[in-house]
Image: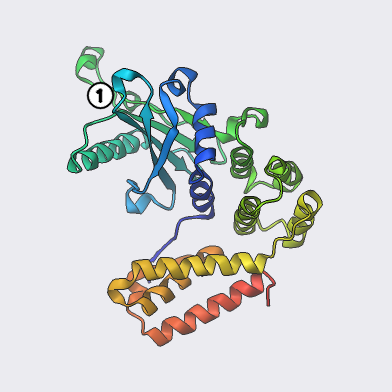
Amino acid sequence: MAESRLPTPHNNLFRFSLSQIPTVRSLIETQFPSRVVEELMLDTLALEKDSFIDPQLRESYSDLLFSVMLRNPRFQNERALVYILFEHKSHSDRLTAFQMLKYIVRIWEQGLRNNLPLCPILPFVVYHGDDPWNAPKRIEDLIPAPEAFGEFSVRFGFPLLDLSQTDDDRLIGEPFLQCVLRLLKYGRSPKLLMELKNIFQLLTPLGISLDLKDRLEAIVVYIMTVNNSIPIEDLQTTIHQIFAVEIEPGSIADKFRQEGLQKGREEGREEGEQRGALIGTIQTCQSLLGEATFERESLSAKTVEDLALLADQLQAKLRRRYKSD
């Protein structure tokens, strides 16, 4: 049976964290050159909905696109786009510069279809592989050519944040941004247990709030799905010591199952809400369990009764995993 995967836990954490405008604003302010930041009216920063990644690469990449108005009066009615690509394979990809250029062209093409003028696009890549990034960051380095061709050559490059090579004290910015970058850096490492308390303490400036609890839940789900060496009891104890709040893993699993149901309803209207909701639940549970997920086409061929049985089995397995029975 053909298999595919839902967005990985790394992908989920990345998208959750950078869908928070204060967090992505902090990433821009701390990682882009000051001369670039000065040109942007960051109060106008807004998340765009589209993704431009090739479907076959979505297991290894996530992307987010933001619009922002330009500060210079000459460009008062113009906007720029900030395109952030998250690369979460265990090795750097030699063709990333080509892929980024291709995605940027797609963004321009979509804008032209919507009668929007071409505008600047600022690319940025976040990488958290195990090994240092060693792939070209400029398109010119991918295409060996005589120097005489320079005038006719495409020139394009992207800035890169390589978490494997960045000291913790350089991962600065808004508290949740610091927390997420360190989680991505240490998430799969045996060092995570030693770093855990320091990572959680980065969130103390947020105080006890609903926002804090949402962030803690996202962090706990991420850790449980990427690092099997940390018992949930240790996570709960560490959180309670710092924040005096309780995080119930069962409630987190329920929350993600409900998100799977909602996703299924949205994607499955053409084939019926019940079938779509069950497919969403199955794929979400498999993703949380770290299992390969069935392709939507193969699930669509099953009867509603078979889908319901499979969904019940996976949810029971998930409850046992999170000790929420």
Residue 167, quarter of picture: top right
x and y percent of residue 79 in the render?
A: 32, 30
Amino acid at the residue labelled 1:
Val
Q: Name the side, left or right, on which 51 lies relative to 314.
A: left
x and y percent of residue 66 in the render?
A: 39, 39
Q: How is the image coloured?
A: rainbow
Residue 182, quarter of picture: top right
Residue displayed at 28% across by 72% down:
270
Residue displayed at 65% across by 74% down:
320
In the picture, which quadrant includes the N terminus?
A: bottom left
Residue displayed at 46% across by 23% down:
37
Give the vertical position of 134 relative to 276 (above or below): above
Is residue 2 visible to us here? no
Q: Nearer the viewer, residue 323 or 147?
A: 323
In the picture, which quadrant includes the C terminus?
A: bottom right
Residue occupying the far right of the picture:
241
Q: Nearer the viewer, residue 103 or 152?
A: 103
Residue pointed to by mark 1: 154
Q: Residues within 10 Å of mark 1 (few under 14, many from 20)?
A: few
Q: Name the side, left or right, on which 276 lies relative to 87.
A: left
Give the vertical position of 95 relative to 196 (above or below): above
Residue 198, quarter of picture: top right
Q: Nearer the viewer, residue 212 or 252?
A: 212
x and y percent of residue 288 in the render?
A: 55, 64
